[in-house]
Image (spheres, rainbow, N blue to C red):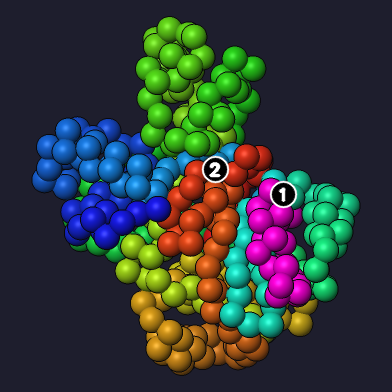
Protein backbone atom coordinates (compact mmCIF):
# COMPACT_ATOMS: atom_id res chain seq x y z
CA UNK A 1 0.00 0.00 0.00
CA UNK A 2 1.18 3.53 -0.74
CA UNK A 3 2.16 5.98 1.99
CA UNK A 4 1.71 9.74 2.16
CA UNK A 5 5.26 10.07 0.87
CA UNK A 6 4.15 8.36 -2.35
CA UNK A 7 1.54 10.99 -3.23
CA UNK A 8 1.89 11.66 -6.96
CA UNK A 9 3.08 15.09 -7.99
CA UNK A 10 1.74 17.04 -10.96
CA UNK A 11 4.69 15.72 -12.95
CA UNK A 12 3.75 12.17 -11.95
CA UNK A 13 0.17 12.70 -13.04
CA UNK A 14 1.33 14.13 -16.37
CA UNK A 15 3.43 11.01 -16.92
CA UNK A 16 0.50 8.74 -16.10
CA UNK A 17 -1.74 10.75 -18.44
CA UNK A 18 0.83 10.34 -21.22
CA UNK A 19 1.02 6.59 -20.61
CA UNK A 20 -2.78 6.36 -20.75
CA UNK A 21 -2.49 7.59 -24.33
CA UNK A 22 0.69 5.74 -25.34
CA UNK A 23 1.37 2.99 -22.78
CA UNK A 24 4.53 1.66 -24.44
CA UNK A 25 6.02 4.93 -25.64
CA UNK A 26 9.79 5.14 -25.17
CA UNK A 27 11.06 7.32 -22.35
CA UNK A 28 13.26 9.19 -24.83
CA UNK A 29 10.21 10.13 -26.90
CA UNK A 30 8.10 11.14 -23.90
CA UNK A 31 10.98 13.22 -22.55
CA UNK A 32 10.53 15.77 -25.33
CA UNK A 33 6.82 16.14 -24.57
CA UNK A 34 7.08 16.23 -20.76
CA UNK A 35 10.28 18.31 -20.63
CA UNK A 36 12.11 15.76 -18.50
CA UNK A 37 15.14 13.49 -18.84
CA UNK A 38 14.39 9.92 -19.96
CA UNK A 39 16.16 8.52 -16.90
CA UNK A 40 14.00 10.69 -14.63
CA UNK A 41 10.83 9.45 -16.32
CA UNK A 42 11.92 5.82 -15.96
CA UNK A 43 12.73 6.35 -12.27
CA UNK A 44 9.45 8.15 -11.67
CA UNK A 45 7.48 5.35 -13.29
CA UNK A 46 9.34 2.71 -11.28
CA UNK A 47 8.41 4.51 -8.06
CA UNK A 48 4.75 4.87 -9.04
CA UNK A 49 4.52 1.26 -10.18
CA UNK A 50 6.27 -0.15 -7.11
CA UNK A 51 3.90 1.79 -4.83
CA UNK A 52 0.91 0.38 -6.73
CA UNK A 53 -0.24 3.86 -7.75
CA UNK A 54 -0.09 3.14 -11.48
CA UNK A 55 0.32 0.03 -13.60
CA UNK A 56 0.14 -1.03 -17.23
CA UNK A 57 -1.35 -4.26 -18.50
CA UNK A 58 -1.82 -5.87 -21.88
CA UNK A 59 -5.37 -7.17 -22.27
CA UNK A 60 -6.35 -9.70 -24.89
CA UNK A 61 -8.79 -8.18 -27.33
CA UNK A 62 -11.92 -10.24 -27.89
CA UNK A 63 -14.53 -10.00 -30.62
CA UNK A 64 -17.35 -7.87 -29.17
CA UNK A 65 -19.80 -9.76 -31.38
CA UNK A 66 -18.90 -13.01 -29.61
CA UNK A 67 -18.17 -11.86 -26.05
CA UNK A 68 -20.77 -11.56 -23.32
CA UNK A 69 -20.38 -8.49 -21.07
CA UNK A 70 -22.70 -8.58 -18.06
CA UNK A 71 -23.37 -6.51 -14.96
CA UNK A 72 -24.47 -8.40 -11.86
CA UNK A 73 -25.92 -6.95 -8.65
CA UNK A 74 -25.50 -9.42 -5.78
CA UNK A 75 -27.42 -9.43 -2.51
CA UNK A 76 -25.60 -11.14 0.33
CA UNK A 77 -25.52 -11.59 4.05
CA UNK A 78 -23.50 -8.59 5.28
CA UNK A 79 -21.72 -10.81 7.79
CA UNK A 80 -20.32 -12.84 4.89
CA UNK A 81 -19.69 -10.01 2.44
CA UNK A 82 -15.89 -9.99 2.80
CA UNK A 83 -15.64 -13.75 2.33
CA UNK A 84 -17.97 -13.66 -0.67
CA UNK A 85 -16.05 -10.77 -2.22
CA UNK A 86 -12.74 -12.61 -1.77
CA UNK A 87 -14.16 -15.76 -3.34
CA UNK A 88 -15.52 -13.85 -6.34
CA UNK A 89 -12.13 -12.26 -7.06
CA UNK A 90 -10.89 -15.81 -7.72
CA UNK A 91 -13.37 -16.37 -10.54
CA UNK A 92 -11.50 -15.61 -13.81
CA UNK A 93 -14.57 -14.43 -15.69
CA UNK A 94 -15.40 -11.82 -13.04
CA UNK A 95 -13.25 -8.86 -14.09
CA UNK A 96 -14.40 -6.38 -11.45
CA UNK A 97 -15.75 -6.77 -7.90
CA UNK A 98 -17.06 -3.68 -6.12
CA UNK A 99 -18.73 -3.02 -2.77
CA UNK A 100 -21.88 -0.95 -3.04
CA UNK A 101 -23.31 1.52 -0.55
CA UNK A 102 -26.84 0.45 -1.49
CA UNK A 103 -28.87 -2.68 -0.83
CA UNK A 104 -27.21 -4.25 -3.87
CA UNK A 105 -24.28 -5.36 -1.76
CA UNK A 106 -21.76 -6.27 -4.48
CA UNK A 107 -21.50 -5.15 -8.10
CA UNK A 108 -19.76 -7.42 -10.60
CA UNK A 109 -18.56 -6.87 -14.15
CA UNK A 110 -18.41 -10.24 -15.90
CA UNK A 111 -16.78 -11.14 -19.21
CA UNK A 112 -17.46 -14.53 -20.73
CA UNK A 113 -16.93 -16.15 -24.10
CA UNK A 114 -20.66 -16.87 -24.34
CA UNK A 115 -23.98 -16.55 -22.53
CA UNK A 116 -23.73 -20.27 -21.75
CA UNK A 117 -20.45 -19.72 -19.89
CA UNK A 118 -22.09 -16.95 -17.84
CA UNK A 119 -24.96 -19.23 -16.89
CA UNK A 120 -23.18 -22.54 -16.37
CA UNK A 121 -19.93 -21.34 -14.80
CA UNK A 122 -20.21 -17.88 -13.26
CA UNK A 123 -23.79 -18.00 -11.99
CA UNK A 124 -23.36 -21.52 -10.63
CA UNK A 125 -20.24 -20.52 -8.67
CA UNK A 126 -21.92 -17.35 -7.44
CA UNK A 127 -25.09 -18.98 -6.16
CA UNK A 128 -23.15 -21.80 -4.50
CA UNK A 129 -21.39 -19.38 -2.13
CA UNK A 130 -22.75 -19.38 1.45
CA UNK A 131 -24.43 -16.08 2.24
CA UNK A 132 -25.45 -15.15 -1.32
CA UNK A 133 -29.15 -14.26 -1.11
CA UNK A 134 -29.85 -13.42 -4.72
CA UNK A 135 -28.67 -11.56 -7.80
CA UNK A 136 -29.85 -9.53 -10.79
CA UNK A 137 -28.10 -9.66 -14.14
CA UNK A 138 -28.13 -7.24 -17.05
CA UNK A 139 -26.39 -8.20 -20.29
CA UNK A 140 -24.74 -5.50 -22.33
CA UNK A 141 -26.18 -5.18 -25.82
CA UNK A 142 -23.66 -2.51 -26.79
CA UNK A 143 -20.64 -1.03 -25.05
CA UNK A 144 -20.37 2.65 -25.91
CA UNK A 145 -17.41 3.60 -23.71
CA UNK A 146 -15.06 1.77 -21.35
CA UNK A 147 -12.45 2.56 -18.72
CA UNK A 148 -9.67 2.05 -21.28
CA UNK A 149 -10.64 5.43 -22.80
CA UNK A 150 -10.77 7.40 -19.52
CA UNK A 151 -8.07 10.07 -19.14
CA UNK A 152 -6.74 12.16 -16.26
CA UNK A 153 -6.88 15.35 -18.31
CA UNK A 154 -3.59 16.75 -17.00
CA UNK A 155 -1.81 17.28 -20.33
CA UNK A 156 -2.65 20.27 -22.50
CA UNK A 157 -3.98 19.89 -26.03
CA UNK A 158 -0.57 20.23 -27.66
CA UNK A 159 0.97 17.62 -25.37
CA UNK A 160 -1.90 15.21 -25.98
CA UNK A 161 -1.47 15.57 -29.72
CA UNK A 162 2.26 14.90 -29.47
CA UNK A 163 1.79 11.82 -27.30
CA UNK A 164 -0.95 10.51 -29.58
CA UNK A 165 1.65 10.35 -32.36
CA UNK A 166 3.65 7.95 -30.19
CA UNK A 167 0.73 5.58 -29.64
CA UNK A 168 0.50 2.35 -31.57
CA UNK A 169 -2.49 2.40 -33.95
CA UNK A 170 -5.37 0.24 -32.74
CA UNK A 171 -8.64 -0.96 -34.13
CA UNK A 172 -7.38 -3.14 -36.96
CA UNK A 173 -8.28 -6.81 -37.17
CA UNK A 174 -6.22 -9.09 -34.97
CA UNK A 175 -3.86 -11.38 -36.87
CA UNK A 176 -2.81 -14.92 -36.03
CA UNK A 177 0.28 -15.46 -33.89
CA UNK A 178 2.53 -18.55 -34.09
CA UNK A 179 2.75 -20.64 -30.89
CA UNK A 180 6.27 -19.40 -30.09
CA UNK A 181 4.92 -15.86 -29.72
CA UNK A 182 2.17 -16.77 -27.27
CA UNK A 183 4.66 -17.15 -24.41
CA UNK A 184 5.09 -13.36 -24.44
CA UNK A 185 1.43 -12.66 -23.68
CA UNK A 186 1.37 -13.58 -19.94
CA UNK A 187 4.35 -11.30 -19.27
CA UNK A 188 2.76 -8.42 -21.16
CA UNK A 189 -0.48 -8.98 -19.23
CA UNK A 190 1.28 -8.42 -15.90
CA UNK A 191 3.62 -5.68 -17.12
CA UNK A 192 2.59 -3.84 -20.24
CA UNK A 193 5.97 -2.10 -20.46
CA UNK A 194 8.14 -5.20 -20.08
CA UNK A 195 11.12 -5.07 -22.44
CA UNK A 196 12.35 -7.68 -24.87
CA UNK A 197 15.54 -8.07 -22.82
CA UNK A 198 13.57 -8.77 -19.64
CA UNK A 199 11.39 -11.34 -21.38
CA UNK A 200 14.40 -12.94 -23.06
CA UNK A 201 15.96 -13.69 -19.67
CA UNK A 202 12.79 -15.36 -18.40
CA UNK A 203 12.12 -17.29 -21.61
CA UNK A 204 15.78 -18.26 -22.16
CA UNK A 205 15.75 -16.80 -25.64
CA UNK A 206 18.03 -14.28 -27.27
CA UNK A 207 17.02 -10.61 -26.95
CA UNK A 208 17.03 -10.24 -30.73
CA UNK A 209 14.59 -13.13 -31.11
CA UNK A 210 12.23 -11.81 -28.44
CA UNK A 211 12.38 -8.28 -29.86
CA UNK A 212 11.33 -9.61 -33.25
CA UNK A 213 8.52 -11.62 -31.64
CA UNK A 214 7.46 -8.64 -29.51
CA UNK A 215 7.18 -6.43 -32.58
CA UNK A 216 4.96 -9.07 -34.17
CA UNK A 217 2.75 -9.32 -31.07
CA UNK A 218 2.26 -5.57 -30.89
CA UNK A 219 1.46 -5.12 -34.58
CA UNK A 220 -0.89 -8.12 -34.51
CA UNK A 221 -3.39 -6.11 -32.42
CA UNK A 222 -4.16 -9.08 -30.18
CA UNK A 223 -3.42 -6.96 -27.10
CA UNK A 224 -4.78 -3.64 -25.91
CA UNK A 225 -2.38 -1.90 -23.53
CA UNK A 226 -3.96 0.02 -20.68
CA UNK A 227 -2.49 2.32 -18.03
CA UNK A 228 -4.43 2.34 -14.75
CA UNK A 229 -4.18 4.65 -11.74
CA UNK A 230 -5.23 4.01 -8.15
CA UNK A 231 -8.50 5.91 -7.89
CA UNK A 232 -7.60 7.51 -4.55
CA UNK A 233 -4.72 9.36 -6.22
CA UNK A 234 -6.52 10.27 -9.44
CA UNK A 235 -8.29 13.36 -8.12
CA UNK A 236 -11.61 11.56 -8.69
CA UNK A 237 -12.05 9.43 -5.54
CA UNK A 238 -15.81 8.88 -5.82
CA UNK A 239 -17.23 6.20 -8.11
CA UNK A 240 -20.95 6.28 -8.91
CA UNK A 241 -23.06 3.98 -11.05
CA UNK A 242 -26.42 4.92 -12.57
CA UNK A 243 -29.08 2.57 -13.86
CA UNK A 244 -31.19 4.44 -16.37
CA UNK A 245 -33.88 4.01 -18.98
CA UNK A 246 -33.23 5.57 -22.38
CA UNK A 247 -35.70 5.52 -25.32
CA UNK A 248 -34.78 2.77 -27.79
CA UNK A 249 -34.09 5.25 -30.57
CA UNK A 250 -31.89 7.48 -28.39
CA UNK A 251 -29.07 5.17 -27.29
CA UNK A 252 -26.59 6.36 -29.92
CA UNK A 253 -27.27 10.04 -29.22
CA UNK A 254 -26.99 9.34 -25.49
CA UNK A 255 -23.61 7.72 -26.07
CA UNK A 256 -22.41 10.76 -28.01
CA UNK A 257 -23.53 13.07 -25.20
CA UNK A 258 -21.74 10.95 -22.59
CA UNK A 259 -18.55 10.87 -24.66
CA UNK A 260 -18.27 14.62 -24.08
CA UNK A 261 -18.35 14.20 -20.29
CA UNK A 262 -14.81 13.55 -18.96
CA UNK A 263 -16.10 11.87 -15.78
CA UNK A 264 -17.52 8.88 -17.66
CA UNK A 265 -15.72 5.56 -17.15
CA UNK A 266 -18.33 3.32 -18.76
CA UNK A 267 -21.51 3.65 -20.78
CA UNK A 268 -23.39 0.61 -22.03
CA UNK A 269 -26.79 -0.35 -23.36
CA UNK A 270 -28.20 -3.35 -21.50
CA UNK A 271 -31.13 -5.71 -21.24
CA UNK A 272 -33.81 -5.17 -18.62
CA UNK A 273 -36.11 -2.41 -17.45
CA UNK A 274 -33.05 -0.24 -16.82
CA UNK A 275 -31.54 -0.45 -20.30
CA UNK A 276 -28.53 1.81 -19.82
CA UNK A 277 -25.61 1.72 -17.35
CA UNK A 278 -23.38 4.73 -16.68
CA UNK A 279 -20.35 4.73 -14.39
CA UNK A 280 -18.41 7.88 -13.52
CA UNK A 281 -15.44 8.89 -11.38
CA UNK A 282 -16.24 12.12 -9.54
CA UNK A 283 -14.39 14.61 -7.35
CA UNK A 284 -16.98 14.48 -4.54
CA UNK A 285 -20.38 13.07 -3.62
CA UNK A 286 -21.78 16.59 -4.02
CA UNK A 287 -21.04 16.30 -7.75
CA UNK A 288 -23.68 13.57 -8.11
CA UNK A 289 -26.54 16.08 -8.26
CA UNK A 290 -24.67 18.24 -10.77
CA UNK A 291 -24.08 15.21 -12.98
CA UNK A 292 -27.71 14.13 -12.83
CA UNK A 293 -28.82 17.60 -13.87
CA UNK A 294 -26.35 17.50 -16.77
CA UNK A 295 -27.57 14.05 -17.84
CA UNK A 296 -31.21 15.14 -17.97
CA UNK A 297 -30.26 18.23 -19.96
CA UNK A 298 -27.99 16.44 -22.43
CA UNK A 299 -30.05 13.28 -22.97
CA UNK A 300 -33.74 14.02 -23.69
CA UNK A 301 -36.04 11.32 -22.35
CA UNK A 302 -33.55 9.71 -19.99
CA UNK A 303 -34.96 8.36 -16.71
CA UNK A 304 -32.43 7.95 -13.92
CA UNK A 305 -33.82 5.00 -11.98
CA UNK A 306 -31.09 4.52 -9.38
CA UNK A 307 -27.65 5.76 -8.42
CA UNK A 308 -25.19 3.75 -6.38
CA UNK A 309 -22.00 4.97 -4.71
CA UNK A 310 -19.16 2.44 -4.79
CA UNK A 311 -17.52 2.10 -1.38
CA UNK A 312 -14.47 0.24 -2.67
CA UNK A 313 -13.28 -2.24 -5.27
CA UNK A 314 -11.42 -5.44 -4.45
CA UNK A 315 -10.77 -6.28 -8.10
CA UNK A 316 -10.72 -4.06 -11.16
CA UNK A 317 -10.19 -5.38 -14.67
CA UNK A 318 -8.50 -8.52 -13.42
CA UNK A 319 -6.26 -6.69 -10.95
CA UNK A 320 -6.47 -7.10 -7.16
CA UNK A 321 -6.67 -3.86 -5.19
CA UNK A 322 -5.77 -2.81 -1.65
CA UNK A 323 -8.29 -0.90 0.48
CA UNK A 324 -6.56 2.35 -0.54
CA UNK A 325 -7.18 1.45 -4.24
CA UNK A 326 -3.50 0.75 -4.96
CA UNK A 327 -2.55 -2.37 -6.85
CA UNK A 328 -1.70 -5.70 -5.28
CA UNK A 329 -0.97 -7.19 -8.67
CA UNK A 330 -2.87 -9.39 -11.10
CA UNK A 331 -5.32 -12.04 -9.93
CA UNK A 332 -3.96 -15.57 -9.96
CA UNK A 333 -6.25 -16.47 -12.83
CA UNK A 334 -6.78 -13.29 -14.87
CA UNK A 335 -9.69 -13.26 -17.31
CA UNK A 336 -8.90 -14.09 -20.91
CA UNK A 337 -10.51 -10.88 -22.15
CA UNK A 338 -10.79 -7.72 -20.09
CA UNK A 339 -10.54 -4.77 -22.44
CA UNK A 340 -14.29 -4.14 -22.41
CA UNK A 341 -14.48 -3.65 -18.64
CA UNK A 342 -14.71 -0.47 -16.65
- Front position in the image: 301 or 146: 146
Label 2, secondary structure: give it: strand
Residue at the (61%, 75%) spot, across then down? 100
Q: Residues within 10 Å of mark 2 (few under 14, many from 20)?
A: some
In the rendered structure, are the residues bearing label 1 and label 2 in contact, judged by CB atoms less than 8 Å apart?
no
Residue at the (39%, 11%) spot, across then down? 207
**Side of 199 relative to 35 (left or right):** right
> Disc 1 or 2, which lies upstream in sequence?
1
Whether residue 75 is in magenta: the answer is: yes
- Front position in the image: 135 or 249: 135
Extent of the magenta region: 68-91
- Front position in the image: 115 or 6: 6
Tag on residue 91?
A: 1
Residue at the (64%, 17%) spot, across then down? 179
Res. 149 in view: no
In the image, residue 142 lies at what x, y percent? Answer: 66, 63
Q: Would you identify the image quadrant in which residue 155 lies?
A: bottom left
The residue wearing badge 2 is 330
Whether residue 126 is in magenta: the answer is: no
> In whole angstroms, how far apart are the C-alphas of marks 1 and 2?
13 Å
Quadrant into which the C terminus falls: bottom right
In the image, residue 282 lies at what x, y percent? Answer: 41, 76
Residue at the (69%, 82%) spot, across then down? 103
Label 1, secondary structure: give it: loop
Amino acid sequence: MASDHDLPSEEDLALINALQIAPRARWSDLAHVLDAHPTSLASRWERLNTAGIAWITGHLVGDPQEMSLSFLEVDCDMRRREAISAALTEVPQIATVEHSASDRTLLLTVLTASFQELSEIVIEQLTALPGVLGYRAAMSTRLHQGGYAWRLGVLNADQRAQVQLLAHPTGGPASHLPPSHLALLPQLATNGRVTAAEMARKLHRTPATVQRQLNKVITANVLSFRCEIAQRYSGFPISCQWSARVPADAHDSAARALAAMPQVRLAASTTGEANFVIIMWLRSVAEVMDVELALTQRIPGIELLRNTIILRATKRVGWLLNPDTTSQGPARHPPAVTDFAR
